[in-house]
Image (cartoon, rainbow, N blue to C red):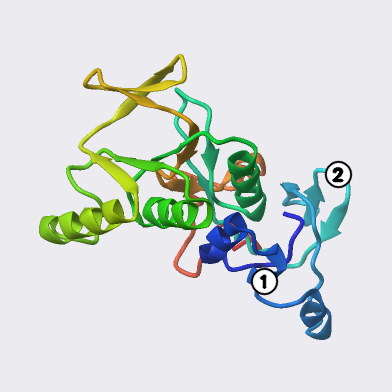
Amino acid sequence: ESYPPYYRMRLEEVISGKDESTIFIHPESWYAEKGISLVYGEAAKIDRDGKKVHLADGREFDYDELIIATGSDAVSLPFAEGYTLRTIDDAKKIRAAILSSDAPVSIIGGGLLGLELADTIKTAFDRPVTVFETSEYILPLQLDRDSAVYLKEAMAEKGIKIVTGIKMVAERDGKLLASDGSEFEKGILIYSVGSRPAKAIAENSGVKCNRGILVGNNLSSCDGIY
């Protein structure tokens, strides 16, 4: 990314209109004072024999020991084009989409991020928001059914519609189609359906992977790489 490290849990603030610098963990000057060099660019491949990291723009950097800390990528579903929220640029794209259209907002995924996002959009833009959740009630990993019903009612009072027990499977003529045959207006679609390990650079460099990057007890993947 083209920003210094930031608090990812506060990305909704950028959607609301705050400057992205307000969620930076430290100003850039802090890193220089600590002897830390921030390099902006995509690390594309690791030369394990030559001990170099190659960037997509052609730059390369030597290393003695290397830590891969690439985190996760947001998941989207293939049947309809939509947004995800994982980065500052994602937040800016969502904000721009909402400001450029008066369409309602649909969020697929009634987990913590999906519900926080729905609340942010409703509060900041007073836009109709509908959340779709495949489980029988929202936050099934965090709440019991009675608590979920109470939360759903509280969000409904704010004007946020939550539809549970439904799975979207297709898009047709600006409508989202559910597996039970029902249809809903798509509007501005945002996916909040989880994440997967960001392991592309490891796979491209011959570092062993399965669902994620494989490591030993000391978090080593191979010689000099952790």
Residue hosting label 1: 22
Horizontal side of residue 45 vs 171, given as left or right: right
Which residue is nearer to you in this view: 104 or 94?
104
Does 218 appear above or below 103?
below
Which residue is nearer to you in this view: 193 or 44?
193
Residue hosting label 2: 57
Helix, strand or loop for disc 1: helix
> Distance between the Cα atoms at labels 1 and 2?
29 Å
Helix, strand or loop for disc 2: loop
Horizontal side of residue 143 vs 191, given as left or right: left
> Residue 164: x, y in percent?
23, 40
In the displayed orientation, state which residue is furthest to the bottom.
33
Does 218 appear above or below 157?
below
Figure quadrant of the N terminus: bottom right
Other residues around mark 2 within 10 Å, as few (<14) / some (14–19) / many (≥20): few
Q: Is residue 220 visible?
A: no
> Residue 192: x, y in percent?
43, 45
> Residue 43: x, y in percent?
74, 50
As shown in the figure, which amino acid type bears the numbered disc 2? Asp
* Labels 1 & 2 near each other (Cβ < 8 A): no
As shown in the figure, which amino acid type bears the numbered disc 1? Thr
Which residue is nearer to you in this view: 103 or 151?
103
Sooner in the amino-acid sequence: mark 1 or mark 2? 1
Q: Residue at x 81, y 62 (%)?
A: 39
